[in-house]
Image: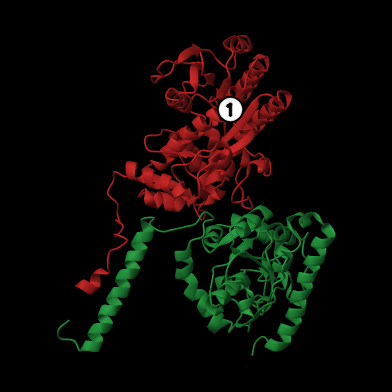
Chain colours: A green, B red
Amino acid sequence: MNGLPTPTAEAVTEWAATVQSTSDKILRRLAGEYHEDEWGFDEEFTETVFPIFEFLYSKWWRVETVGVSNVPAHGRALLVANHSGAIFPFDATMIATAIQKEHPLPRWVRSMVLNWAFDLPYLSFIMRRLGGVAANSANLGRLLEEDEPVMVFPEGSRGFAKPFAERYRLQRFGRGGFVEVALETGSPIVPVAVVGAEEIYPKLGEAGPLGRLFGSPHIPITPTFPWLGPLGLLPLPSRWRIEFLEPIDLSGYGPGSSADRSLVFDISEQVRDAIQQALYRGLVERGPAFA
Amino acid sequence: MSGKRILVAGASTKWGSELIRALLNEPEVGEIIGLDSSPPTRDLGSTRFIEADIRDPGLSKLLPSLSPDIVVHCGIVWYPEKGRPSRALHDINVIGTLQLLAACEKTQGLEALVVRGSAAIYGSGPGAPAFFTEDMARRLPLETRFQRDIGELEGYFDNFARRRPEVVCCMLRFEVEVGPGLDNAFVRYLNLPVVPTRMGYDPRLQLLHADDATGAIVAATLNPVRGPVNVAPDGAISLSRLLRLCGKTTIGLPPLVSGLINRRVGDFVGSADLYRDGELLFRYGRGCDNTRLREEIGYELAFDSEGTARDFARATNRIPQLFPAPHPGSPVRSVER
């Protein structure tokens, strides 16, 4: 490197070091030398793909995040959000990205994923490595007992597959299983309102038989999907706003209260109402989706 | 005789003889009686061996005359083999257990019954709990023949436990055992030159080390607790990482091909038509909670899932690796150049 001017030599060395460390990392991973936790969450993998989410967060959807400090920095927490996406659950990834980027003490948030998603090839283990866990109260309870932050989407597939015309209208919140677990584990509930995610794949219809062919309960039809093939999977660049609301503290009720159906429904409604109000507010704050 | 009299059914099986050999060194054990249809292949020391088939109705005369304090049933067979199809397995597992339970009914002074069962009763599924606890046994439908067999014999076992409340009935549900030198279908699968996997799936597995498999049943025999107990290691490991640690070449099979090839592979590694169980396990994986084993039986596991994988890889990895791992502490080499 003697003949080269110094800045170039430095750049070359730096570049070589980057290549070296990247290739070392790849070789190390190929040899199985990496860590995954008991749930299958692979932090190194998540950090490696994180730049993609970071790009989507700041450049593609220009996400504005409000109230991120409402997510506790320590201990268990149950994040409850509205669900949408129709094709990919980008809302979950963006909530996790918002906490990583904006929170003073960022943590990786686990998410409860619909069961059938773990039946899909590739997606099943990619989601697991990113911290996805099959949605059932046993898993949720165990994660919260381990003092992890977890996000749930009580609308479930009703929210995920809702048509474009019904965007930002919260579907019903199931049986309130998430409230039961929150009461049992004494976890605070942080309602989260995601504005913008419901415009990325405007779902017009449903290709039911096609979906069954692939073993998925639904395949959406959007203006671009499936007409443009893989290109139709590109989400629209709507503007996003994610609002974390004040945590609802449930520790006063005690673990026995989870059997009280009316209490469970009341809290479930309270959470649902808070999210719906925040959605209306957020829609006004954000303004037009594509501007 | 001061110590307890322990009868081990299935004494010639791998785990039966492991248990007996470990019990020989235990001071609280008085006499060990081994029972199996074929003589043991390993040296069982001072064990009194009786050649008898547990499927034989004569067992209900034999067992009471031996008056054991503890009966351990190690005769449940997991893997059908060539010449021992799953129908024969049903006979051994279900009918055999039923006869043994009937014989136990007639045995006076029986203190405990320990059965070496399988965690296969939980099944595997996309929406399954990541860690099955003992109360989740029939949460997923019993899909395969082996699962139904295990379900059926656990049913008989529960009935027996209800009828004879003075007997401590302990059902151990074992996860897949892996260990250097162990010979079972899963280990043979891992030892294939090219390991076939299901394309697009990477199950999360728990690997129980062979040492822990023996240790746990010894601990359960000496300190049995009531009801089912999962014998599973801490943590879990994905199949892909396990195979990488072992330095294996893998091939991902697409759905239509995998059915055909899996059957062949099943024949080859000696799991014959158990392949359906393996198929589900290799697609969705399974994890079990081991709190009861650790806290109630009081057994401390020597290996977690990753430790088992590493121990196995160390022992079996004879072929040089294509990409040896750089030392974790090694500095970036290009800077030195």
Q: Quadrant of residue B211?
A: top left
In this picture, is B310 found above or below B82?
below
Q: Position of residue B257 (x, y in %)?
A: 50, 47
**Does B102 sit left or right of A272 as displayed?**
left
Indicate whether B80 appears above or below A166.
above
Q: Which residue in the structure is indicated by mark 1?
A: B114
Whether residue B325 sits left or right of residue A59 in the image: it is left
Instruction: Identify the residue at the far front of this view.
Output: B2
At horizontal 51% and vertical 42% (from top left) the residue drawn is B260
Q: Answer with the quarter of the image where residue B327 lies.
A: bottom left
- The quarter in which the N terminus of chain A is drawn is bottom left
Q: Position of residue B31 (x, y in %)?
A: 49, 16
User: Would you identify the image quadrant in which residue A283 lies?
Assistant: bottom right
Quadrant for the C terminus of chain A, please.
Answer: bottom right
Name the amino acid, label 1: Val
Q: Is residue B231 visible?
A: no
Residue at point 38%, 47% (across, down): B310
List x then y, in percent, for residue B42.
Answer: 39, 21
Name the chain under label 1. B
Q: Is residue A75 visible?
A: yes
